[in-house]
Amino acid sequence: MDKNPDMYSQHISQQFNNELEEIKNQLLSMGGLVEKQVSDAMRALIDADSGLGKAVRRKDDDINQMELHIDEECTRILARRQPAAIDLRLVLACSKAATDLERVGDEAAKIARHAIKLTEEGEAPRGYIETRHIGSRVRRMIQDALTAFARFDPELAFRVAQEDKSVDLEYKTAMRELVTFMMEDPRSITRVLNIIWVLRSLERIGDHARNIAEHVIYLVKGQDVRYIGLKRMKEEVLKDNS
Amino acid sequence: MDKNPDMYSQHISQQFNNELEEIKNQLLSMGGLVEKQVSDAMRALIDADSGLGKAVRRKDDDINQMELHIDEECTRILARRQPAAIDLRLVLACSKAATDLERVGDEAAKIARHAIKLTEEGEAPRGYIETRHIGSRVRRMIQDALTAFARFDPELAFRVAQEDKSVDLEYKTAMRELVTFMMEDPRSITRVLNIIWVLRSLERIGDHARNIAEHVIYLVKGQDVRYIGLKRMKEEVLKDNS
């Protein structure tokens, strides 16, 4: 269910509508690329494919350039079109979401770097299964946050924020296990540390997905829901503001 | 040398000038508080003062609220005043710098959490001296980035970006030493991991200081200098755009 056509304010200029649609599409393309980077970085790790890891690292600059481009477009629209209400919120949300996506790209590049190191150092240490599982969950969070953005769907966005809390718990459990493993087998320290850094990156990717979800709620509901906790966030999302 | 009075565009409305000045002052106040949080968190770590650590954690929400407030003000100015050129860049730079400062606050709260843990676990492990040194350097970076913002000084901002590169090198060296230490004395693993997380937070604080510095260069020079490398950044900073 795509709610877009009704969402923007009524503009005299069709051109302005096109510009808003265009900036949103650019953000979603950037999101698609970033999500692929996360997925490729995890595949490089699990399949011990250092070639794929290197490809992820090379592509990181494309993502940086996409962020610059989206930000430039947002600034241009602010200066020339002087948007208000939902249009203004859309432009600001795109600019902020682009920053979050760029950071997700950075984390994917870091995961790729650890994948390359682990591949070079040989056999896989313990902790892969949990990492793989958390990896799938945060990838799904990025996908859902982007879908929520595409559809202006605050309820889906809320579910992403909920998921982030649950991923954080799984992250903590996995981290404790890895620390225990290092203590039991100190020869594994450097290798396990690589997995620990990957886990940390995944946890941060989850945070960024949650940020993007919060931008979507702000965009649609006009309410900044950062730092208010899940309970109040849910109330804001369910509030009828039509 | 305060260049402010000449920086804003000439406005018919003195009120608008006041609003721009006010948003900048709010950002600088937030910066002052965040810098104190970093400094208190490091003191809690070094003096094994868990009371101070807890105070830092309590104050983190004040910083979150300051970010929300600044962001709200920025959106209000964009909607009502429809700023252009340097005024628009100032509003956008304030909004972005507030996000970076809020993240620095998060890292300070994390450092405080590790300080509390380390205090509870007793005696101090190796790695404090390097951590302390890197801590002073990143605090100085935050200060300088804020001074550069207050004075619209792109050259000082550039020096912050330069410093970030050098701090990253020191961080890597300190990290290698800590890993070696864990391997030599596996009983220290959990304690050294706490120091490792503190180091990681400090490195990220340095990154945010660099981001703020880049916002200052964008604000004054009208040029987005992210991802272009220090050499080209310096050229942009020295370029005469008067």
Image (spheres, coloured by chain):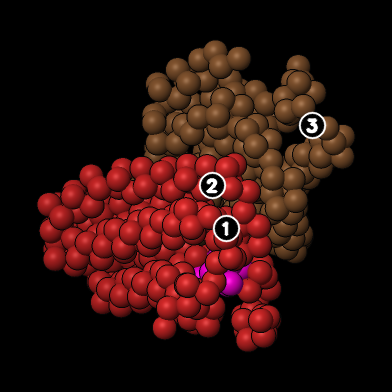
Chain colours: A red, B brown
Depth check: give the residue in front, B206 or B69: B69
Name the side, left or right, on which B182 lies relative to B199: left
Magenta stretch bounds: A213-220
Q: Position of residue B24 (x, y in %)?
A: 75, 39
Instruction: From the image, tell me which residue sits under label 1.
Output: A12
Q: Position of residue A131 (x, y in %)?
A: 31, 72
Choose top left, top right, bottom left or bottom right for residue B23: top right
Q: Using the numbered discs, state the Cα–Cα distance from disc 2 to disc 1 in whole angstroms.
A: 15 Å
Q: Is residue B168 visible?
A: yes
Instruction: From the image, tell me which residue sits under label 2.
Output: A77
Residue type at mark 2?
Answer: Ile
Instruction: From the image, tell me which residue sits under label 3.
Output: B11
Q: How many marks?
A: 3
Choose top left, top right, bottom left or bottom right for residue A27: bottom left
> Are discs 2 and 1 less than 8 Å apart at CB?
no
Which residue is pictured at 30% across the width and 52% down the height?
Answer: A109
Query: Is the stretch drawn in magenta largely helix, strand or loop?
Result: helix
Count neighbours of disc 2 (C-alpha within 10 A) and say few if under 14, some if 14 to 19, many if 20 or more. some
Q: Which chain does the residue under circle 3 lie in?
A: B
Q: Position of residue A64 (x, y in %)?
A: 37, 45
Which residue is pictured at 22% across the width and 57% down the height?
Answer: A115
Q: Using the numbered discs, state the Cα–Cα distance from disc 1 to disc 3 in whole angstroms.
A: 28 Å
Which residue is pictured at 48% across the width and 34% down the height?
Answer: B224
Q: Position of residue B146 (x, y in %)?
A: 68, 34
Q: Quadrant of the C terminus of chain A?
A: bottom right
